[in-house]
Amino acid sequence: MKTLLKNGTLITASDTFQSDILIEDEKIARLGLNLEVDSDQRIDAAGKLILPGGVDPHVHLDLPMFNTVSSDDHYTGHKAAAFGGTTTAMDFIPLTPPPHPVGEGQRGEGDFQYSVDLWMKKAEKAAIDYSFHMNLTQFNDRIAKEIPSLRGMGIQTLKVFTAYNGRLRIDDGSIFRAMQIARDNGMLVMAHCENGDVIETLVGKALAAGHTSPEWHALTRPGWGAIDATLRVAGLAAESDASVYIVHMNMGGEVDMLKYARERGVKVMGETCLQYLFFTIDDLRRPDGAKWICSPPMRTEKDNARLWEGLRDGILQTVGTDHCPFFLDGTKPIIYEGREIAIAGKELGKDDFTKIPNGLPGIQDRLPVLWTQGVGTGKISANQFVELTSANPARIFGLYPRKGSLLVGADADIVIWDPQKKVSYGVSKSHQRTDYNLYEGWELKGYPEKVFLRGKLIVDGDEWKGKRGDGKFLKRGEGEIL
Ligand code: DUC
Ligand code: ZN
Ligand code: ZN
């Protein structure tokens, strides 16, 4: 199957240039001006931009939380991603104990192979390409010894948490040892940076004082905790000589800590997520404040502004989403693909902010919103947009140049982007399986027109041409340090 894309303007992380593209089967076969080749399909992209498909480094699909589950699975979340121009997504595998002890593990201890098998099964319905990170939420000698086995499963990345005491957090000594193992095995440690001890203390006090509303989610997770944890994790990276990637950076001070460490040669990189560029604690104070509950929480306008600077100046390397949607009111069904569906959501915490499932939608919103708000306003260039949303995540996570590039030989994951298309955005335009959208009523300019996954047209305007099972698991190799 040959597809010829004519007359487009290609945008990569480093260049903007005119070229035709010949796609042969799943790959980009040729680039050049005035390509004339017999093809099965010819598309005129005059006046349009051609971007490599987006790579979202941070999503949570079908994730059990607080007696419910994130409301997009590996089909619906991927379909939404594709409509927003994203063709690769990476989600996190919870380290899960098998029903019966296996190997040398004790009852209740997580097992890597079991956890990976579980997630592979869930992802059989994938509609775009995908890979996984492993949550390292327990640590002992057996687990330490087994970490390198993850590479054979195509998983190169471990996520550690400095918060969620007694649940997801491991202590700093264990994080340090994990970093040493990662360093010795060409793996990357990803870190969720908040101060778990401070959070536990403040949450207990807030509940005892009868504070139940969503804003207390932010008030009990102070920004200084994110800053101190960022510096601590950067320190552990320096002391172990490991490569580290700090996820969902949300505080201006975290950007400053990252800059401090990077200027001193520490191999630490940073991601922010779309929502932290726009929203603040004031959104949690609205009557529908539960919509904005995620961890870490929304901060202030000054933090929004510093994160934008971090993107512009190359202190931060990526923009992800932390896509982890829940219904605002999971007692009322929505229609998805012609069927009614309702999944318990934020209403679970209507009387107690600690019971509101943490997370929000964004996998479809990321590219169109960032384009309008970033490129459209001159805060970042079109090349930086591609770098932050596609090329850098592909490089850091060992997928470049197969993903994140428009080079000959790369997977033909291609977005034909209409820079003039105006969209009044919101839930009616979204394929995210939830009942709200954070960008409701936002006027966007610039939107995906056609999206190809490995040469197959999966989104054509408003039409879905993809299907369950189109997505492939990507075994990742060692990534780059940017
Ligand atoms: N934060 C969220 O808000 N949801 C899922 C996981 C996370 O770190
Ligand atoms: Zn996290
Ligand atoms: Zn997350």
Image: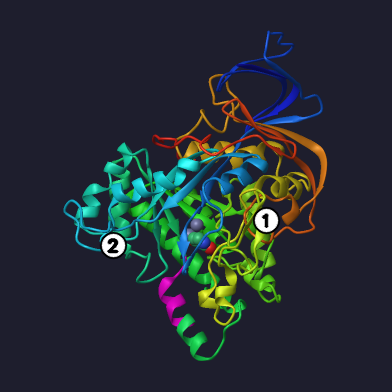
Image point (67%, 45%), residue name: 367
Q: In this view, does 121 lie above or below 322?
A: above
- The numbered mark at residue 77 is none
Q: Hey, which quadrant is residue 106 in on the image?
A: bottom left
Residue type at numbered disc 2: Gly
Whether residue 473 is in magenta: the answer is no
Q: Residues within 10 Å of mark 1 (few under 14, many from 20)?
A: few
Q: Is residue 127 above or below residue 346?
A: above
One can see residue 6 in this view: no
Q: Disc 2 and disc 1: Cα gap in Å?
A: 48 Å
Q: Which of marks 2 and 1 is nearer the N terminus?
A: 2
What span is colored magenta in the figure? 194-202
Q: Picture coordinates of residue 3 (x, y %)?
A: 66, 18
- The numbered mark at residue 173 is 2
Element type where label 1 sits in the image: strand
Prevalent SS, magenta region? helix
Instruction: Tell me how many marks there are.
Output: 2
Q: Which of marks 2 and 1 is in front?
A: 1
Q: Nearer the viewer, residue 178 or 460?
A: 460
Residue type at numbered disc 1: Ile
Q: Picture coordinates of residue 275 (x, y %)?
A: 64, 58
Label 1 sits on residue: 335
Furthest residue toward left? 104
Q: Which of 320 and 117 is in front in this view?
A: 117
On whether ligand 1 comes within 8 Å of the CB at mark 1, the answer is no
